[in-house]
């Protein structure tokens, strides 16, 4: 980010609060991050899509380390590069291209006749800017006899998006940066009207949006808590040091803490309900295990009875087999005796002739 409020921090180290908040926002739940990407890039990924963070650190030509930590890959294929800014910067197009090329080179695809470099889809998000923000940055790449190509990077002027539109596009995880809307006005003068505007922005615009999106499922309970915490950090950074803010500081602290407590209590209630459901299911499973055990015993007893019956049947079959053998032997004896009688008759007939 180009705006530097703390000059004692080296240029190659990203410690600015806006950078920190933006990077933390990008690590909220996959549901929240997918909704942000859909809102920024006009895509329609399901909220259960897989997110891969490309945290790779690389060095540029001047050996300065650059964190390409805002490139996110969805479902292992489509990548999106989100760069946060606070002031227009003509050099930003080169950094975005550099980040994009480095990402594409690390993830190049090999084909039969070479390689394919797939650049991430870029978007520059202007969280705040005192100067006009261009809608598109264009970098013309001249490949000589092969022609030219225009590399375009569109921008998102966050402060120009009404909060209602922000909610409609499900980009609520950027809501803490709405505090920047009154930054210049509060800096100039802290009249009761200005303080009321800031109070309304916090209570209705920011906290109200977080509650609304939590209710309809665009963010999780954890997301809501972290967004309130980030809002508090930004508020402390932007406004808490003004003397006129003492009353508003107390209100903001109480409001954010109260909302946190409400969500925490709701979360604990949900956990208690889930524990009760789990306990009931465990009891049911235990009863079913007892029934299954009893049925197994009955089946085992039946198996024993069947085994005994099979043994009896086997014994009977053996007895029948033995009887059949005896009958067969008797039939052989009878057959032999009948043969002897026949021979005796023949001898008698021969004698009587």
Image (cartoon, grey):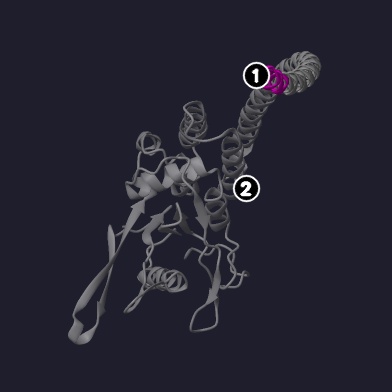
Q: What percent of the width, then of the height, locates residue 246?
A: 64, 37
**Label drawn at residue 241:** 2
Which range of residues does the magenta coloring cover? 342-353
Residue 232 in magenta stretch: no
Q: Is residue 81 visible?
A: yes
Q: What percent of the width, then of the height, locates residue 1?
A: 48, 63
Q: What percent of the width, then of the height, locates residue 164?
A: 37, 33
Give the residue at x 50% y 51%. 51
The answer to whether 130 appears left or right of 32 in the picture is left
Q: Is residue 317 visible?
A: no
Residue 311 vs 71, above or below: the answer is above
Q: Secondary structure at mark 2?
A: loop
Residue 351 in magenta stretch: yes
Give the residue at x 58% y 65%. 14
Of labels 2 and 1, earlier in sequence is: 2
Q: What percent of the width, then of the height, locates residue 57?
A: 56, 70
Which secondary structure is most common in the magenta stretch? helix
Q: Give the alpha-carbon distance from disc 2 to disc 1, as whole Å.
A: 154 Å
Q: Which residue is disc 1 drawn over?
A: 353
């Amino acid at each position: 980010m180009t705006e530097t409020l703390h000059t004692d921090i080296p240029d190659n180290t990203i410690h600015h609060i806006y950078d920190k908040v933006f990077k933390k926002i990008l690590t909220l739940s996959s549901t929240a991050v997918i909704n942000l990407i859909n809102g920024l890039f006009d895509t329609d990924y399901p909220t259960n899509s897989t997110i891969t963070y490309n945290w790779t650190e690389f060095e540029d030509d001047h050996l300065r380390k650059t964190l390409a930590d805002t490139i996110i890959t969805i479902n292992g294929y489509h990548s999106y590069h989100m760069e946060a800014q606070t002031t227009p910067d003509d050099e930003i197009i080169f950094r975005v291209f550099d980040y994009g090329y480095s990402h594409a080179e690390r993830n190049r695809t090999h084909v039969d006749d070479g390689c394919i470099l797939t650049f991430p889809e870029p978007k520059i998000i202007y969280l705040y800017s005192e100067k006009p923000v261009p809608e598109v940055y264009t970098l013309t790449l001249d490949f000589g006899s092969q022609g030219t190509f225009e590399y375009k990077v569109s921008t998102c002027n966050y402060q120009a998006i009404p909060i209602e539109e922000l909610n409609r596009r499900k980009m609520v995880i950027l809501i803490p940066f709405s505090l920047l809307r009154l930054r210049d006005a509060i800096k100039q003068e802290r009249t009761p009207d200005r303080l009321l505007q800031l109070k309304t922005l916090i209570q209705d615009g920011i906290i109200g949006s977080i509650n609304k999106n939590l209710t309809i499922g665009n963010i999780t309970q954890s997301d809501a808590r972290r967004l309130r915490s980030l809002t508090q950090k930004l508020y402390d950074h932007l406004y808490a040091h003004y003397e006129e803010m003492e009353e508003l500081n107390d209100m903001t602290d109480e409001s954010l803490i109260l909302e946190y407590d409400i969500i925490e209590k709701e979360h604990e209630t949900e956990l208690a309900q889930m524990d009760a459901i789990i306990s009931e299911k465990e009891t049911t499973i235990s009863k079913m295990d007892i029934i299954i055990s009893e049925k197994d015993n009955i089946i085992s007893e039946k198996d024993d009875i069947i085994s005994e019956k099979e043994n009896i049947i086997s014994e009977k079959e053996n007895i029948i087999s033995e009887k059949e053998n005896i009958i067969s032997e008797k039939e052989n004896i009878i057959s032999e005796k009948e043969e002897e009688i026949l021979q005796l008759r023949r001898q008698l007939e021969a004698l009587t002739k």
